Image (tube, rainbow, N blue to C red):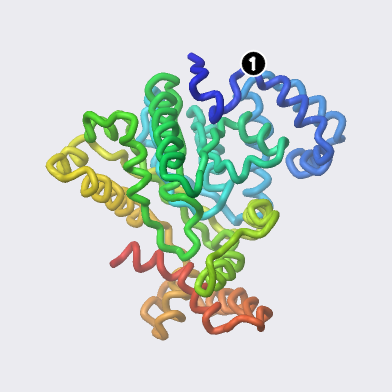
Amino acid sequence: MNNSKFDDIRPYHEDEIPAAMQRISQSEVFPLLASFVYPGQPVESVRERVSSFTTVRQFQEDAMYKVNEQVIARSTTGFTCCGIEHLRPDRSYLFVSNHRDIMLDASLLQYFFISQGFDTTEITFGANLMVNPLVVDVGKSNKMFRVERPGGYLKAFYRASQHLSEYIRYAISQKRQSVWIAQRNGRTKDGIDATDQGIIKMFCMSEPADKIRALSDLHIVPVSVSYEWESCDILKTLELYESQYTRYTKKPGEDLNSILTGILQPKGHVHFEICEPLSLAELTAFEHQTANEYHKSVARLIDRRIHAAYRLYPNNYIAHDLLYGNRRYQSEYTAEQHDAFVRRLSKLDRYDTCDVEQLRELFLGIYAHPVDSKYI
């Protein structure tokens, strides 16, 4: 069921996998990748193993599954995921997730699906990340499809959004493939997860005649991601700080640095919650709203699901108490946990060319805001 209309953004077809595996296995950084994914195995045997993959499923169930196993073993104290009972194995869904880590939010969910015998999803992948041939091969072999973010011209942005909307609907309704997408463009930096109503508008663009059917046919499932230690927390703090004073511009190699930091940085416990799908009844309740109101209402509905499903950790409560100067949540953490968090916070002191108090406030907000989102 190939459609050449989407050749510019789609993942690899099965017949493209063998050549991609050859390119991956011959990459100059392959020995480094092999040592991470298959520790203790001779690089040549790993090269032979990877080059023998001929299907997406083989690549995902072997190489990518082991990538996630290594991430969990090396950088977490535990990984859990709940909510699989909300899904039907024979149905394709549009998973709309809060976005905290460039790669792991989607990657760990695929790991869980494989472990439960479910099919994996296709994954949105920003064009800004598809700048390296190896990344392109790994991404497109892992069911990732390209998302263009054209700046400047409104017509170009509209065309890209229309094209993306059509592809998502095609993937779900015709390819029978589920799709993962973040609730907004880019990661949440400040701990406030909010679905961009523009994303909801984009979903509807490919079915303009019926706004209820436009979303009900996609079977939208919110996903709530919670990290005990926020991925790239210090990097996010510095970006937030710089953004207060100037228009933030990404530095060369910044995305790659964030990917590697997210993979390697200790994250403590990581929890995913697959929320209840949006129902036809819930969507129909917004039927008499204008299109703009409808998009906003659906975005807020997704937010409520995600916020309610947060797994809050002692760090979140500690940060909230420190940020607001009280002990409201002191029963939620121990003195040792408090001290560990303060030690992490004190790492900001090294950035003495910045206003350290502002840095601390921004850092605390990253952890504290989920508490407000869940309870207020």
Q: Is residue 121 above or below residue 364?
A: above
Q: Quadrant for residue 280, please give it.
A: top left
The residue closer to the viewer here, 219 or 170, is 170
Q: Secondary structure at mark 1?
A: helix
- Vertical side of 332 occupied by 254: above or below: above
| Residue at the (50%, 32%) spot, across then down | 122
Residue 350: give x, y in percent of width and height. 68, 80
**113 vs 22: above or below:** below
Query: What's the residue at 35%, 56% (across, down)?
Result: 307
- Three-letter amino acid code at disc 1? Asp
Q: Is residue 290 visible?
A: yes
Residue nearest the viewer, comparing 147 with 150: 150
Residue 51, percent across and down? 77, 24
The residue at which mark 1 appears reads as 15
Residue 226 x, y percent position in the rendering: 47, 56
Q: Is residue 40 visible?
A: no
